[in-house]
């Protein structure tokens, strides 16, 4: 995928990320009482129970890591668009590599599905706009961040000259 | 990185990176000259990540993390993972109870999904990782390709176990009608989350190249011999 | 420099497409579309936002930021956004977002109040509020300008919405079981409700604002009487048990009923007219009490059971009530008496007043003259038991013809009515005398005698049992035997009789023989008689023999006496 495409998709992902986390994903109503939640609120809900520490990994996997991925990619790709290496390129690239296994937006989607089916038995469930945004985000992140990024190194290598490994 | 490369010439065994005195960077993939000695560490010339021939202390770490996650798996299933209260009367439910409830109420699909994600996958990971560690430790030559595939599978499905944690999170965030109906997470889900994270870390610590080291007899210092 | 064997051909460098500043690739449509969607959503939320208003309340009880809704005519029109304290901390400021569609409802004189769950007024209103908390109700105003700052009402207002109808004010001493929302009945049909109530400024009465729906409000005229029709009006007074109800709702939450006199032709009362709320239907429909007169009574007995407010009855009619009860000490007689002050309303007698002989003077003088007249005829005050269960007393003014004459001073103030002891006291005396009579019966000696008799009887019975009875048994047995033998004897006798019977049968030879023998005996006897006669006449015949002039006695059986009689002269 050429850099331009990747960048465009990353920009899309950024916009979609905002929608996905600002708009509530699911809206429930029970006997006239309503409630709704965004992905962030879902992770935060774990923080109040007895399992409070698990809220941190939950928030990381479905909100923070995707955010970092998009942010870093934008950073790197905008420079890469003009075939340059962004400042802190190495750090950014290493971080992106490390973040890959921890980005779980798709697990979040499946979790939403299971939760919705679980809830329909006793409350009325309406899907919010956030859920569609999350679905799109899931696809986009898979496209831009989950694939190999080594080529970026090579793409931007020319400006740093041919590197010969000298240990 | 250095699995056997099928070349036209099959008579001569393909050289390994260490034989060619090459080392690849796990972060950026650059292959560069391996000149480091036993004790000093080098960094990748382009991405400055630490270079390792094999993941450091792979088997030790993997065992430690695996055992820890197995230990945590007991309270994860024994302690309740969430508390559902309807009109004030609350009911704790564990993972298995949730599966059974779904099954009994006719949602076979959901019951299956949760069962797979919360029981089948972690147990499979335990078994597979255990198998990989044992066989690598003993330098077994048994079914190496299959083991490599197993490892890739473990890596791939590993993080889907997080499903249960996120389901509890979403449900707890939504059902918050004080007095009428309330769902709260309980400590079981913390242990379960730890299990998922630890097994993921264990899989990440295990260096799959160790599977193939038995073939070449390569011993890397720092492993549990 | 190491040689790097290349098992594969060296890859080409990637094709770097120089970014064209002028030609934008189609891929940028994707983020463009995303941006568009996001933007439109933003615009949508922005434009669908209605006005934001602030309402000031004294307390935020039941209100929850993000949850509490605002409702107009039971439809959600907004949501409470946040709740903050005012700067001086004395009030609560509620920030609410109103739906765009309801923006037109917010006028300058719109009113807001908190609707909390209420149990009353015909049931539980709004079960939802119990679960979901309170909500803010709203009344659309009539003004044309908008406003964004409001002061909330602490209690729901009297007229909600543009409901047609009229509101009035009722004045009463006690709220009793009435509450906001208590129904108002006309001929047992609910026609309105209580809107609100407040204590009057002087604290002596309660003002109730009621709202009567159209078209029933035209039945409320200045002559209308209102009364408290609350269900549980169980008065266990001296009059007995009294219970009336309009409907089940009134039992729960109280209610007010009203009615008009059938001859009333007045126009409907204007809004805000003040009425008095009577305690019950009887007192509401009763003719006005009229002025009251105060009378003092003096009782020589204990008046336990008489309470202030107890009714005073005149020949069975309620004419007043007891105002106070005080003890009094009579130094002359050296004992305590009870002074009761009663208040009577002569007008309650109604039309009868016109039939009474006319008198002159002030009301008090008139009453005094009345009383003087009737005291002469025996009008006395008496404390009677109104309720045996509770022992409550009431004062009865009644005629007791046998009462001793008492001097009545019509000029004494306060007017004092003579009293006689109550019927219950008589009963007490009678019971006391019966008890003393029973006491005088010598129970002891009766008992002792009875005891002795019983003991004797016991002994006698023992004897009978022990001796007499076996003897008697024996005797009976003997008698039985005797009877048995007697029976046999009897049989023998019967046989003998039978023989005898056969013997003396008419043709029995025995009878014949017997007959002949008797004949012979008769002849012999005759002859003997003749002899003796002769001897009697001629005693010398014994010696000389028979005289010759005496014929030989002929034996004739048929003729006897005449011959003999001749012979024996």
Image (tube, coloured by chain):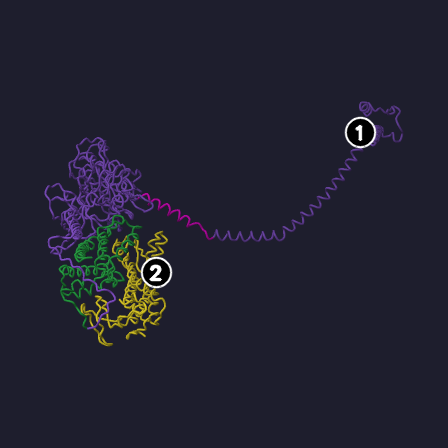
Chain colours: A green, B yellow, C purple
Dominant secondary-structure state across the stretch colored magenta: helix
Classify A130 as above or below C567.
Answer: below
Secondary-structure class at tag 2: helix
Q: Chain of mark 1?
A: C
| C459 sits left or right of C536 in the view | left
Tell me the crowding category of disc 2: few under 14, some 14 to 19, or many 20 or more residues within 10 angstroms, Cα based: some
Q: Position of residue C99 (x, y in %)?
A: 17, 46
Figure check: B48 above or below C345: below
User: Regarding mark 1 in the picture, which secondary structure is present there?
Assistant: loop
Looking at the rendering, the stretch of residues picked out in magenta corresponds to C422-444
Q: Does residue B108 appear to the left or right of C11 in the view shown? A: right
What residue is shown with label 1? Answer: C506
| Residue C358: quarter of image | top left
Residue B120 is tagged as: 2
Quadrant including the C terminus of chain C: top right
Spatial distance from mark 1 to mark 2, Cα to Cα?
Answer: 145 Å
């Amino acid at each position: 995928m050429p850099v331009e495409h990747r960048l465009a998709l990353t920009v899309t992902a950024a916009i979609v990320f905002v929608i996905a986390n600002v708009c509530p994903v699911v809206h429930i109503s029970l006997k006239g009482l309503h409630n709704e939640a965004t992905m962030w609120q879902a992770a935060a809900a774990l923080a109040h129970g007895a399992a409070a520490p698990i809220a941190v990994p939950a928030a990381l996997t479905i909100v923070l890591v995707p955010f970092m991925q998009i942010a870093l990619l934008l950073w790197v790709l905008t420079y890469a668009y003009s075939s340059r290496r962004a400042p802190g390129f190495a750090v950014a690239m290493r971080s992106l590599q490390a973040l890959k296994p921890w980005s779980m937006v798709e697990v979040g989607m499946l979790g939403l599905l299971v939760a919705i089916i679980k809830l329909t038995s006793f409350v009325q469930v309406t899907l919010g706009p956030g859920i569609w945004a999350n679905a799109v985000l899931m696809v986009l992140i898979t496209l831009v961040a989950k694939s190999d990024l080594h080529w970026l190194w090579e793409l931007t290598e020319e400006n740093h000259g041919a590197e010969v490994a000298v240990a | 990185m250095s699995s056997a490369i099928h070349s036209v010439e099959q008579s001569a065994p393909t050289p390994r990176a260490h034989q060619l005195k090459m080392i690849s960077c796990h972060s950026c993939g650059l292959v560069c000259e391996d000149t480091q000695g036993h004790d000093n560490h080098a960094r990748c010339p382009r991405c400055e990540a630490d270079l390792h021939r094999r993941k450091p202390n792979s088997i030790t770490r993997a065992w430690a993390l695996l055992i820890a996650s197995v230990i945590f798996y007991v309270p994860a299933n024994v302690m309740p993972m969430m508390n559902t209260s309807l009109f004030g009367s609350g009911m704790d439910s564990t993972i298995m109870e949730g599966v059974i409830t779904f099954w009994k109420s006719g949602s076979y699909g959901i019951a299956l999904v949760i069962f797979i994600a919360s029981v089948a996958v972690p147990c499979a990971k335990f078994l597979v990782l255990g198998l990989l560690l044992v066989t690598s430790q003993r330098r077994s030559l048994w079914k190496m390709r299959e083991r490599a595939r197993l490892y890739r599978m473990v890596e791939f499905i590993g993080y889907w176990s997080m499903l249960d944690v996120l389901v509890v999170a979403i449900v707890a965030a939504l059902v918050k009608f004080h007095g009428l109906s309330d769902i709260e997470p309980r400590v079981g889900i913390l242990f379960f989350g730890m299990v998922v994270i630890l097994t993921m870390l264990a899989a990440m610590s295990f260096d799959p190249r160790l599977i193939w080291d038995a073939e070449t007899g390569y011993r890397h210092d720092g492993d549990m011999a | 420099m190491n040689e790097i064997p290349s098992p594969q051909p060296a890859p080409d460098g990637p094709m770097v497409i120089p970014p064209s500043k002028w030609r934008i690739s189609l891929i940028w449509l994707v983020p463009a579309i995303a941006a568009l969607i996001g933007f439109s959503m933003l615009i949508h939320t922005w434009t669908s936002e209605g006005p934001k208003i602030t309402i000031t309340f004294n307390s935020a009880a039941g209100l929850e930021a993000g949850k509490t809704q605002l409702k107009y005519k039971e439809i959600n029109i907004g949501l409470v956004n946040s709740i903050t304290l005012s700067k001086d901390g004395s009030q609560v400021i509620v920030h609410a977002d109103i739906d765009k569609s309801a923006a037109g409802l917010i006028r300058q004189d719109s009113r807001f109040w908190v609707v909390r769950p209420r149990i009353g007024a015909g049931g539980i209103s709004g079960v939802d509020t119990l679960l979901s908390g309170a909500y803010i109700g709203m009344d659309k105003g009539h003004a044309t300008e908008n406003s964004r700052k409001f002061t909330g009402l602490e209690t729901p207002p009297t007229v909600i919405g543009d409901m047609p109808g009229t509101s009035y004010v009722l004045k009463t001493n006690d709220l009793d079981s009435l509450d906001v929302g208590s129904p108002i009945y006309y001929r047992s049909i609910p026609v309105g409700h209580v809107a609100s109530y407040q204590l009057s400024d002087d604290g002596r009465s309660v003002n109730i604002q009621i709202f009567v729906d159209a078209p029933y409000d035209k039945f409320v005229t200045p002559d209308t009487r209102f009364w408290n029709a609350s269900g549980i009006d169980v008065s266990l007074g001296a009059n007995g048990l009294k219970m009336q109800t309009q409907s089940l709702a009134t039992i729960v939450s109280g209610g007010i009923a009203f009615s008009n006199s059938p001859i009333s032709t007045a126009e409907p009362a204007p809004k805000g007219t003040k009425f008095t709320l009577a305690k019950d239907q009887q007192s509401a429909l009763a003719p006005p009490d009229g002025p009251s007169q105060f009378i003092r009574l003096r009782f020589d007995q204990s008046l336990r059971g008489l309470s202030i407010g107890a009714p005073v009855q005149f020949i069975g009619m309620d004419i007043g009530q007891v105002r106070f009860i005080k003890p009094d000490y009579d130094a002359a007689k050296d004992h305590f008496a009870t002074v009761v002050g009663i208040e009577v309303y002569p007008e309650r007698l109604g039309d009868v007043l016109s039939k009474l002989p006319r008198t002159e003077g002030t009301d008090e003088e008139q009453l005094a003259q009345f009383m003087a007249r009737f005291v002469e005829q025996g009008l006395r005050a008496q404390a009677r038991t109104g309720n045996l269960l509770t022992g409550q007393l009431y004062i009865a003014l009644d005629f007791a013809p046998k009462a001793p004459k008492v001097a009545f001073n019509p000029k004494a103030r306060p007017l004092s009515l003579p009293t006689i002891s109550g019927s219950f006291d008589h009963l007490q005396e009678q019971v006391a005398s019966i008890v003393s009579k029973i006491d005088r019966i010598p129970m002891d000696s009766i008992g002792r005698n009875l005891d002795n008799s019983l003991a004797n009887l016991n002994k006698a019975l023992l004897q009978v049992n022990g001796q007499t009875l076996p003897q008697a048994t024996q005797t009976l047995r003997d008698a039985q035997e005797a009877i048995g033998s007697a029976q046999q004897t009897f049989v023998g006798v019967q046989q003998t009789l039978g023989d005898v019977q056969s013997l003396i049968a008419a043709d029995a030879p025995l009878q014949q023989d017997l007959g002949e023998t008797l004949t012979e005996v008769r002849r012999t006897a005759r002859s003997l008689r003749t002899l003796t006669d002769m001897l009697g006449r001629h005693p010398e015949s014994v010696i000389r023999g028979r005289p010759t002039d005496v014929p030989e006695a002929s034996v004739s059986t048929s003729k006897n006496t005449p011959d003999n009689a001749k012979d024996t002269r």
